[in-house]
Image: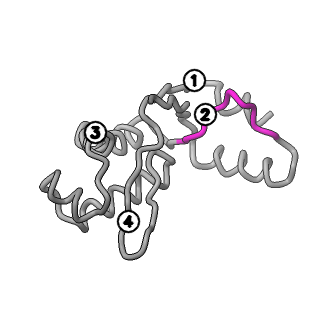
């Protein structure tokens, strides 16, 4: 199953303005607008790095039932995995389901469509 998620690039100040406009009811995001926002292409590249893409593939293919199991599958330390997964969760790429004393990572987004432009953020805030 492939879940395509639109990704947008927008400055932090424009993102803040957009969020406030939404909260005030002045702006309603369209269904076709990005669901994940990054401040820059470089910040997107860090989060969706080759290493993190490999991690997401392992989660998709092996479906680990805990971070300990994921640690064994990847050879990465649990603390490192936890940090990375929390970042990916913050951007809506994964969900971390908590069951009893375990954290179970699940991939939410498998494919990304990036949208940005010189007038992109100003046209949204209008």
Q: Position of residue 115 (x, y in %)?
A: 55, 25
Residue farthest to the bottom, as pictured: 101
How crowded pointer 4 is (Cα within 10 Å; few <14, some 14-19, many 20+) is rated as some
What range of the chain is rendered magenta? 28-37
- On the image, the x and y values in percent for residue 69 come to 22, 60
Residue 58 position in % (x across, y down)? 25, 43
Mark earlier in primary sequence (4, 2): 2
Is 29 one of the magenta-colored residues? Answer: yes
Q: Residues within 10 Å of mark 1 (few under 14, many from 20)?
A: few
Q: Which residue is mark 3?
A: 61
Q: Looking at the image, is mark 3 or mark 2 nearer the viewer?
A: 3
Residue at 25% from the left image edge and 36% from the top image edge? 50
The residue that appears at 50% across and 42% down in the rendered structure is: 38
Numbered label attached to residue 117: 1
3D distance between C-alphas at marks 3 and 1: 35 Å
Q: Secondary structure at mark 2?
A: loop
Residue at 23% x, 65% y is 68
Nearer to us of marks 3 and 1 is 3
Return the residue nearer the eye: 89 or 116. 89
Q: Residue placed at 75% from the left, 37% from the top? A: 29
């Amino acid at each position: 199953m492939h879940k395509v998620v639109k990704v947008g690039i927008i400055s932090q100040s424009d993102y803040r303005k957009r969020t406030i406009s939404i909260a005030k009811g002045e702006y309603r995001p369209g269904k076709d607008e990005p669901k994940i926002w990054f401040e820059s292409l470089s910040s997107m590249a860090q989060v969706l790095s080759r290493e993190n893409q490999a991690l997401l593939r392992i989660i998709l293919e092996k479906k680990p039932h805990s971070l300990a199991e994921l640690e064994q599958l990847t050879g990465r330390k649990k603390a490192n995995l936890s940090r990375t997964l929390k970042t990916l969760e913050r951007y809506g790429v994964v969900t971390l389901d908590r069951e009893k004393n375990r954290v179970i990572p699940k991939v939410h987004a498998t494919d990304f469509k990036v949208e940005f432009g010189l007038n992109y953020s100003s046209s949204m805030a209008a």
